Amino acid sequence: MRIFLLFVVFLYLNASELQITKYITNQKPKIYVEYVHSNSKLNHMLQIDSTIISHYDMKIGGKTNNLTNINFTKYKGYNYLLRFNYQNKTSTALLYNLIDKKIELYKKYKIPNFNSYPFMIHALSYDINSKLGFEPIPWIKRKIVYSVNMAPKESAIFISDITLTYRKKIVSGGFNIFPKWADRAQTEIYYTKYLREPTLFKYNIYTGKKTRVMVSSGMLIVSDVDFDNNKLLLTLAPNDQPDIYEYNLYSKSLKRITKYTGIDVNGHFYGNNILFISNRLGNPNVYQKNLSTGIVKKVIYYSKNQISLTAYNDDIVISSRETNNALGNNTFNLLLVNKNSDDIKRLTLGGKNMLPVFSNDGSTIFFIKEYHFNSKIGIIRLKENKIFYFRLSKIIQSFDC
């Protein structure tokens, strides 16, 4: 139990660097929104998305009689007009260029039920951003999977959109922790369930099919998934001390990667290397092991307590404990470090900022901020130099996106 608690303490953070948007004048495109039939929740989500994306300004107007009859002189000061109609689980959207007087986007979005509306709006926001010529933002359409503590020794796994507006419980009953997406399409997850021994399951979020992958004593946690080669990085502790293992899903074979008498946890695939957290020099720090040569070296020399990491290309985000209060709360901040330089960028200021995860394009970092007895999903837009929070009235044990 002591080792398990040490590991949980280890797990907490993620980020990358700044640029200026394509509008040199600093003038963002302005979009005016009108709707035939809608719902205030849809309008509110459109506004939230435009704020997070930060590439254009949006004003929610009022109702209109139809989608196509437009008086172009009415919208002075705006670059685009968005009109949409939501009926019978389908939204029809038209984006007009008010300068060139042409249609930039005409598309229908269907959802299985109204509760899924955040994903419909995220898809529309993705398309608007693309039509305006900005860098793609695939992360805005993705799901988040997370585990929350429900009671002592009881936790459930949920899926949500990135704003935590849509929430659906998918696994419950018992102690279900450390969910991780099993595929790029986000149809399946891995998670650990504590039965007689920790057991790793694979679960399809659409069909409900559950498959047992493996069982191990002590500790069993998926820290990273190689989608291309069908491999997992696991933290296992069959003999009390946790180490990093690689599990081949094709051959069902297990290979031990680290062999240290202390603590090695939280492994991440990194080209022909793995990055992981180890206490080899007394304090937890980020290390790298070359899988061909077996050489292990320390990667980051800033701070003595690096408790979690995420990486994208040469950028590594660490969660660093920056206070040492034995009887009180400690501060954990996220720091962005470039592997090839001494540059360090502080991403958060104060509080407990943990479990960072890079978006799949490296432009955005997701993380957990603990707030009293609640959690917040934090979203850091690196190039835009902005941060946003979405609150959940429970403590998030772990998550993936």
Image: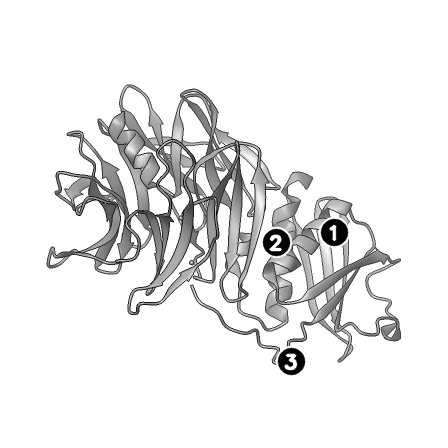
If the image is split into quadrants, where does the N terminus sit? Answer: top left
Q: Nearer the viewer, mark 1 or mark 3?
A: 3
> In the figure, residue 71 lies in which quadrant?
bottom right
Residue hosting label 2: 122
Q: Secondary structure at mark 2?
A: helix
* Disc 1: CA contacts within 10 A as few (<14), some (14-19) or many (>=20): some
Label pair 3/2, CB-CB below 8 angstroms: no
* Residue at the (42%, 41%) spot, across then down: 188
Q: Amino acid at mark 1?
A: Asn
Classify 273 as above or below 22.
above
Could you tell me which secondary element the residue under label 3 belongs to?
loop
Tell me the distance, in whole angstroms, between the alpha carbons under discs 2 and 1.
12 Å
Residue 251 figure quarter: top left
Instruction: Provide the residue designation for mark 3.
Output: 25
Residue depicted at x 36% and y 49%: 320
Question: Residue 88 at what x, y percent from top left?
Answer: 74, 44
Q: Amino acid at mark 2?
A: His
- CA distance for labels 1 and 3: 28 Å
> Tag 2 or tag 3, which sits nearer the N-term?
3
Please tell me whether mark 3 or mark 2 is closer to you in this view: 3
Q: Is residue 68 left or right of residue 110?
A: right
Q: Is residue 217 above or below residue 232?
A: above
Amino acid tagged 3: Thr
Residue that label 1 marks? 43
Relative to 71, does residue 222 appear above or below in the rendering?
above
Q: Nearer the viewer, residue 210 or 387?
A: 387
